[in-house]
Amino acid sequence: GRARAAGMAATLKTAAPPVAATRTQTISFVRHGQAQHNVRAEAKRDAGCPFDEFIATMKEDDAFDADLTEAGRAQARNAHAPEVQLVVASPLSRAVETASLMYPGREIVCVEELREWCGQLVNSKRRTASQLKERFPFVDVSQLHENDERWDAEVLEEEASVARRGMASLAWLARRPEDNIAVVAHGGLLAVTFDPEGHGGHSCVEAPNACTPRFSNCEVRTVTLVTEDGGARFSVRSG
């Protein structure tokens, strides 16, 4: 009887449909605290100014790898920091510092793909990996190239490229062993990733979802991220 049972088990095994490569994780997405280039631009945006005026104001207040303001630091210190197994951030200082104030004493892993829409504005240009490590000794920069190879003074990164980076960062999260991760990133990157309708339909995230509305500075949204087909598609469910 044993051989027959084994034979049946083998038949059942081969007949079973292939299991979809899905991963379910709890991710707390955070936008960095208020930074130097946000102060006037965000106020205008909140008042309903046209997008061009929003960008023009940011240009006037542009600063290399823009730092948090004192208000931004206070926002980060006061932000709700969910219990997580891993803290991940964009390699721009405003995201790293926000993560460090929310999670003091923790190591922070920098992921290149999480950086803001890149080019033209120097606030989107990053320090070298060595400079970042010198300024924030608790960061893990092993995922970064030493130099910023993405930023271009003349050319603004295309929306589709920002979306590809958003997808790549979600796929990176899905490959991590941790089930509960905090991710500190940027308004533009988060918008392009989670609001495909408003951004050329580039991303493979089901929308609208809990992360589709624009993030305020230091806003934290904890969601269930479901990665499907090994990173080909993603869905976001509330809490």
Image (tube, rainbow, N blue to C red):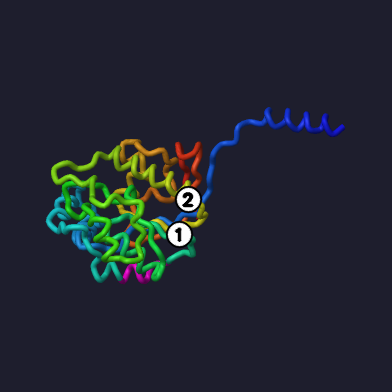
Q: On the image, numbered disc 1 is attached to which residue?
A: 86
Q: Are marks 1 and 2 in contact (CB under 8 Å)?
A: yes
Magenta region, main secondary structure: helix
The picture quadrant where one finds residue 101 is bottom left
Q: Earlier in the sequence, mark 1 or mark 2?
A: 1
- Which residue is drawn at the image coordinates 27% and 40% (left, top)? 159
- Which residue is drawn at the image coordinates 36% and 59% (left, top)? 140
Q: Quadrant of the N terminus?
A: top right
Based on the picture, tell me whether residue 38 belongs to the magenta stretch: no
Image vertical order of residue 125 relative to residue 207, above or below: below
The numbered disc on residue 70 is none
- Relative image position of residue 152 (x, y in whole percent): 17, 45
Q: Nearer the viewer, residue 76 or 141?
A: 141
In this picture, residue 103 sits left or right of residue 148: right
Q: Nearer the viewer, residue 188 or 16?
A: 16
The picture quadrant where one finds residue 86 is bottom left
Asked which secondary structure carries label 2, the reply is loop
The numbered disc on residue 176 is 2
**Magenta region, residue range:** 74-80
Amino acid type at circle 2 is Arg
